[in-house]
Image: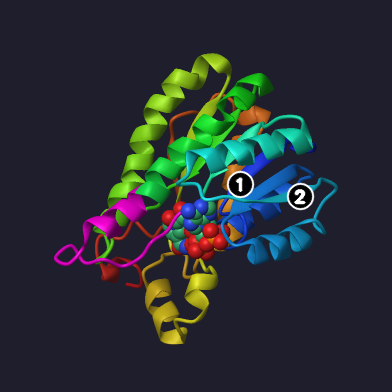
Amino acid sequence: MFDLQSTSVVVTGGSKGIGRGIAAVFATAGANVTIAARSTAELDSAVADLETLGAGKVLGVQTDVADPAACAGLAAAAIDAFGGIDVVCANAGIFPDAPLATMTPAQLSEVLDVNVKGTVFIVQACLDALIGSGRGRVILTSSITGPITGFPGWSHYGASKSAQLGFMRTAAIELAPHGITVNAVLPGNIYTEGLYDKGPEYIAGMTAAIPAGVLGKPEDIGHLAAFLATVEAGYITGQAIAVDGGQVLPESPDAVRP
Ligand code: NAP
């Protein structure tokens, strides 16, 4: 059961943070993993680390997911290296602050281009290979922010993360006849590089809102992605699953630590 050895997996945003955690779980399970990001230095360092984890191979491909031609190049590189694509983790995303009152059209476009169009472009680029796999899997990294919660400065980001779920539901219907499932992981507060510099007070404030009492790890998202990628998860499609230590559950701060 749950065998992912030799599975060909593409992870966008796989050079750091949650994407790297997803790639690490697949690499540990013996999958062949293609990771994509814009910075080649970070890609190279991630490839070197990930290759030590399992029997599979790891490939890094410089890609801007907002560019459909670059997504096509990424898919071609993965097919060339590993003979096909079985799993696509559309994880690359950005979350710059922009309060609604001052948000510019360019700020709005940048977030929608990467988070929404980038999701659609990478799935389109890999589609023929996913169909060829006969058991294709698409796993989107959405967020609790947007689909369930809100946070000041992130109205554009929240809209983009909800838009991914709208895409997911129709894509799941269109692709079901090909044996492809399309699901989304909704991370809560995950301890990634972006948080390291924010200091202990900030981290403590975030942790206090989580019933589990700890921030999530990138691998926590990877474990759900890996399960959704298995043959055994083939009857699950169009679902959005929060991985958040119960963060969205409390009615008020008092509910967390009574
Ligand atoms: P991160 O640490 O900043 O990593 C983002 C990754 O995406 C990097 O590899 C980055 O590499 C890549 N990336 C960004 N823009 C890209 C583009 N245009 N084309 C290709 N790659 C691109 O972020 P993270 O916290 O891991 O977030 C990953 C995903 O999880 C995002 O979709 C985010 O919305 C979601 N999420 C995160 C949290 C959290 O707590 N961290 C919570 C909920 C949801 P380059 O910059 O080199 O391109």
Residue located 58% across and 19% down the image = 179
- Can residue 187 be seen from the camera position used here? no
* Beta carbon at label 1 within 8 Å of ligand 1: no
**Amino acid identity at mark 2:** Val
Residue located 37% across and 78% down the image = 205
**Amino acid identity at mark 1:** Val
Residue 58 badge: 2
Image quarter (top left, top right, bottom left or bottom right) of the C terminus? bottom left
Q: Which residue is mark 1?
A: 11
Q: x, y (%) of residue 44?
A: 71, 62
SS assignment at label 1: strand
Residue 106 inside the magenta-drawn segment: yes
Question: Looking at this view, is 116 or 240 the one in front?
Answer: 116
SS assignment at label 2: strand
Q: x, y (%) of residue 107?
A: 29, 59
Q: Which residues are magenta?
A: 93-112
- Can residue 170 be seen from the camera position used here? yes
Residue 63 inside the magenta-drawn segment: no
Q: Residues within 10 Å of mark 1 (few under 14, many from 20)?
A: many
